[in-house]
Image (cartoon, rainbow, N blue to C red):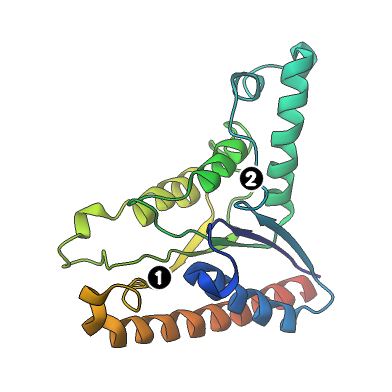
Amino acid sequence: MATLLHLDSSVFPGPASASRAVTDAFRKSWEEQHPEGTVIYRDLSVNPVPHITADAHSAGFADPSEHSPEQAAAFAARVKFIEELEQADAVLIGAPMYNFSIPSTLKAWLDNVILVGRTAGETPSAKGTPVTVVASRGGSYAPGTPREGYEYVQNYLEAILKDMLGLDLEFIVPELTMAPHVPAMSELVPLFEASRAKALQEAADKARTLADQLTSSKAA
């Protein structure tokens, strides 16, 4: 059966988080298709992975036989995250926009799994794995909007996940999530509601499509 690697990074719990609501819809749809499958779940806000250290970084460029005890311990932790990515048949990431960028906890996970010569380079070890990123944001940064130039989440993640790690990337973007909470945005609430409904539907549909594709490929 297929394995889903699911990462959440929102600091807000449960339904208070726009990204978690959408990743939850994806995961529920996925599990309906794969009731006996495996889900590797990491809540990067509740249980952050270690930020990259000098020992963890330098160990990636040295032969394991030459690692110091500190390098060996730090590198072992990196390898665990890397192996979770490599064994996944699909990846789901909740990536809310905080101050125009991704949460630092998600950046820490990326810093750990990016390893030149293994996950990154000429032949990335997880190349072609489908990854769905739920990139929620309080406003709108779509092309043609006043803050289009401040969209650093999708641009950054496309460079890392698609160009560097070779993953098959797709975004789901629930936007205007602050509209119900900011009086000055009250007229945008209908657009927020439409965006949220679209994102939830896209998540459920994407999960079913991926599940069907993976089931077919494993049966072939």
The residue that appears at 62% across and 20% down in the rendered structure is: 61
Say whether residue 87 is visible.
yes
Of 70 and 37, the residue lying toward us: 70
The kind of secondary structure element at disc 2 is: loop
Percent across and percent down for residue 27 are 65, 74
Residue type (three-letter) at the residue carrying disc 2? Pro
Q: Is residue 208 left or right of residue 84?
A: left
Q: What is the crowding at mark 2: few (fewer than 14 residues within 10 Å), some, or many (at least 20)? A: some
Residue type (three-letter) at the residue carrying disc 1? Val
Q: Is residue 132 left or right of residue 67?
A: left
The residue that appears at 59% across and 19% down in the rendered structure is: 54
The residue that appears at 24% across and 53% down in the rendered structure is: 150
The kind of secondary structure element at disc 1 is: loop
Query: Would you name the residue on which mark 2 appears?
Result: 48
Residue 147 in the image: above or below residue 115? below
Of 27 and 131, the residue lying toward us: 27
Say whether residue 123 is visible.
no
Of 23 and 188, the residue lying toward us: 188
Q: Which mark is residue 36?
A: none
Query: Would you name the residue on which mark 1 appears?
Result: 173
